[in-house]
Image: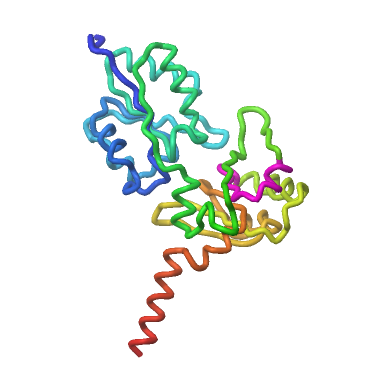
Amino acid sequence: MSNSKPGKVWLVGAGPGDPDLLTVKALRVIQNADLVLFDNLVSQEIRALFPKSVPAFYVGKCKDNHSIAQKDLNSLLVKKAAKGLNVVRIKGGDPFVFGRGGEELLTLIKAGVDAEVVPGITSASGCTTAAGIPLTHRGLAQGCTFVTAHAETELSVDWNALAQINHTLVFYMGVSRAEMIASNLLKAGLSAATPVAIIENGCRENQREVIGQIKDLVSLVANNNVQSPALIVVGEVVSLANDLNPELRAAVSAETLNQHVA
């Protein structure tokens, strides 16, 4: 039986994986949900925060494996809100950064459903910071550009512009497209010695960074058996990782302290 009170849909950004990086608003919305629909990139630690008494269903997508078609998911959001439920649609990162949140919000608005977006820390920001790689740095990069390596039909990227813009480039969903990314950037004139980092499982306990040069991107992915989720970061700012990476700094500090004690 339908609830006489209209429901609402919250499009919530879960951030890159660390539950401590959830916003206060995101956590409050989750705790007051009647139904939670979550994506593949929502970490187990964040899933553990879902109210135990509230139904939670996986509606995520992996490469070549979609648990539900996007149009069907859009319809489901409308249907559940029409029944008076407060629905939390939670996504990894930010709903409006390669998360199809805009498509879902448009559907909800057209259907007359009350909806609100709760921003989240996008992976490019959270994961690079956790790896000690600033997206911008004076003298190295005055801007950053986020690029998806996948598209609904055909990927349309101006590789010449990317190679010449002197921005930090962050490629989402790029592990399986490493050869395409490297070859196109090199053909467009990017220096083969440009630093590159691959950040696997960013902002999680098993985070790992693989650092090298763009000319070696394909072998870096293959030789280190890099698995998704992973970001590819291209640009001179990667050279700062040795000095700014929190784990490396902690190791250096411990070694220095031991030398003084000895």
Q: Residue 57: where, in percent of width, then height?
A: 36, 30
Quarter that holds the N terminus: top left
Quarter that holds the C terminus: bottom left
Of residues 190 and 46, the one nearer the viewer is 190
Q: Residue 92: where, in percent of width, then height?
A: 43, 39
Of residues 227 and 256, the one nearer the viewer is 256
Image side of residue 160 versus residue 176, left or right: right
Q: Residue at x 40, y 81 (%)?
A: 256
Tell whether position 37 is magenta: no
Tell whether position 169 is magenta: yes
Q: Residue at x 67, y 54 (%)?
A: 218
Image side of residue 55 versus residue 14, left or right: left
Residue 75, placed above or below residue 199: above
Q: Residue 174: where, in percent of width, then height?
A: 60, 44
Numbered label tally:
0
Q: Which residues are magenta?
A: 159-174
